[in-house]
Amino acid sequence: MDLILSMKKEYFDLIKTGKKKYEYRFKMPELNINDKLYLYIPKSKAGIYGYIKIRDVKWMSKDETCTFYSN
């Protein structure tokens, strides 16, 4: 299942340059390796600016996510 993911342009730019390699969300439908995440930028020039091919999906609980962020 492909999905449209809304994000701020600043985060999109970091992904595009390779400085941001991971995206963390508290709620996300189940994804598969061959799915694509289309990146939608809602402000100013609203539209889909690209997509990410899913390579790996790691599901974490909120507690695991908090621990991951703090490290």
Image (tube, rainbow, N blue to C red):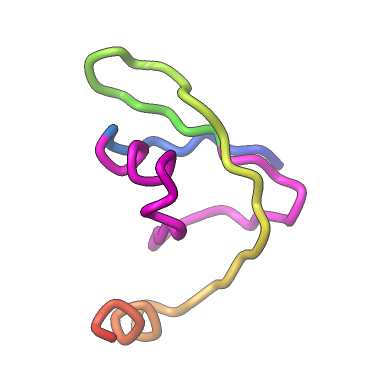
**Residue 58, percent across and down?**
57, 72
Instruction: Report the predominant secondary structure element of the magenta stretch.
Output: loop
**Residue 38, percent across and down?**
55, 33
- Is 65 situated above or below 12? below
Q: Is residue 4 magenta?
A: no
- Is 49 situated above or below 55? above
- Is 20 situated above or below 64? above
Q: Can you tell which quarter of the image residue 61 is in?
A: bottom left
Toward the top, the furthest residue is 45
Name the residue located 55 percent from the left edge and 72 percent from the top edge. Answer: 59
Name the residue located 39 percent from the left edge and 35 percent from the top edge. Answer: 6
The C terminus - image quarter: bottom left
**Residue 63, percent across and down?**
34, 85
**Is residue 46 found left or right of 49 in the rendered image?**
left
As rendered, which of 4 and 49 lies closer to the eye? 49
Toward the right, the furthest residue is 34
**Is residue 45 found left or right of 31 in the rendered image?**
left
- Is 10 situated above or below 67? above
**Residue 9, percent across and down?**
28, 32
Q: Can you tell which quarter of the image residue 12 is in?
A: top left
What segment carries the magenta color? 10-37
Name the residue located 58 percent from the left edge and 38 percent from the top edge. Answer: 3
Name the residue located 63 percent from the left edge and 57 percent from the top edge. Answer: 30
As rendered, which of 68 and 3 lies closer to the eye? 68
The N terminus - image quarter: top right
Q: How many marks?
A: 0
Q: Is residue 13 magenta?
A: yes
